[in-house]
Amino acid sequence: MQETKTAFVAIVGRPNVGKSSLLNALIGEKVAIVSNKPQTTRTRITGVLTRENTQFVFIDTPGLHKPRTKLSEYMVKQVNESVADVDVAVLVVEPAGEIQKAEQELIASFQAQRIPAILAINKIDTLDLREKLMPRILAFSQAYPFEAVVPISALKGDGVDAVLDELEKFAAPSPFFFDEDTLTDQPERVIVAEIVREKLLKNMYDEIPHGVAVTVERMHEREEQQLIDIEVQIYCEKESHKGMIIGKGGGMLKRVASQAREDIEHFLRCKVNLKCWVKVREDWRNRENVIRSFGFN
Ligand SMILES: Nc1nc2c(ncn2[C@@H]2O[C@H](COP(=O)(O)OP(=O)(O)OP(=O)(O)O)[C@@H](O)[C@H]2O)c(=O)[nH]1
Ligand SMILES: [Mg+2]
């Protein structure tokens, strides 16, 4: 029998750099939601990839930022805990600009915990010339002895295999932790709720989506019809937000629900009947008990 190996990998970086996009590209399925708004990911999301005798367990994390609410305190804590006991970290960065404070903090935590790290410079599809990466590579190489620097486009899939090859070097002999066809340890309900949140992020302006939480109240399979009934509760912070989420004549909510249903059907590989309700929970992002009741532990 061939000996098996596993690598635990934390994917870290500032908000909106493409960490969740990279996770999805690495495992070849969408398990983490993606949006053009920062602070999309709120919890640690695990993605699993088994390639021959190596199993990779990826931990996607919320973008490291300065916390302003109890919820974002929780998010930042998730990042720090994720870096604690992995075999290797991937720092995802934008292709241009200066090294940011949050990135310096992440590098400091690699240093403190002696974690090898790979630098993934993402979004290279937005560059006209690759040479423009040189100053960026130089600056980061001076900041930390990265094991490898890999230019990638998570969106196009470029360089993603090279990231895997680098990560494989840090796999240690061990039995597999998951079945070979496992993609994530997230329960279906969590992914369903996240898909609805992604569509809210996609369709609504800034302030509202950040104050939204989504829970699945009911999932019921009608076996004879091969149909799943799903009821989802959307929580927002203000009565006025509720009005905007529902929209004129219910138009916004219909659009969100119909886009979400399409993705949920793809994910569950089954027809879905999706009902969404909207409720107000004032200032929930600062109420610890409410945050907990939404599943952030
Ligand atoms: N052009 C381009 N855009 C990308 C690429 N990767 C990600 N994006 C876009 O960048 C935005 C943020 O992507 P996410 O994957 O949600 O970023 P994240 O780092 O997980 O963000 P948070 O969860 O908020 O920390 C989305 O609009 C993506 O489509 C890339 O390789 N090229
Ligand atoms: Mg994310």
Image (cartoon, grey):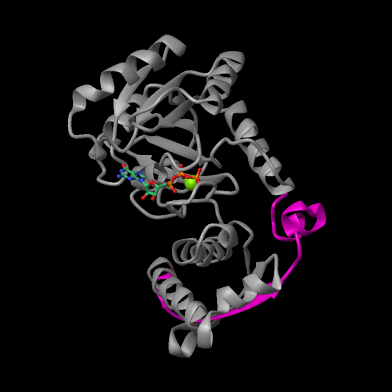
Residue 279 appears in the figure: yes
Residue 144 appears in the figure: no
Residue pictured at 61% horizontal, 14% vertical: 112
Residue pictured at 38% horizontal, 42% vertical: 22
Residue pictured at 60% horizontal, 47% vertical: 43
168 to 153, vertically: above or below:
above
Which quarter of the image is occupied by the N terminus?
top left
Q: Position of residue 34 (x, y in %)?
A: 43, 53
230 to 98, vertically: above or below:
below
For residue 287: magenta?
yes
235 to 104, vertically: above or below:
below
For residue 94: magenta?
no
Q: Is residue 18 left or right of residue 73?
A: left
Q: Position of residue 274 (x, y in %)?
A: 51, 80
Residue pictured at 41% horizontal, 9% vertical: 142
Residues rendered magenta in the picture: 268-297
Q: Is residue 101 left or right of residue 78?
A: left
Q: Position of residue 129 (x, y in %)?
A: 18, 29
Give the image quarter of residue 217.
Answer: bottom right
Give the image quarter of residue 106.
Answer: top right
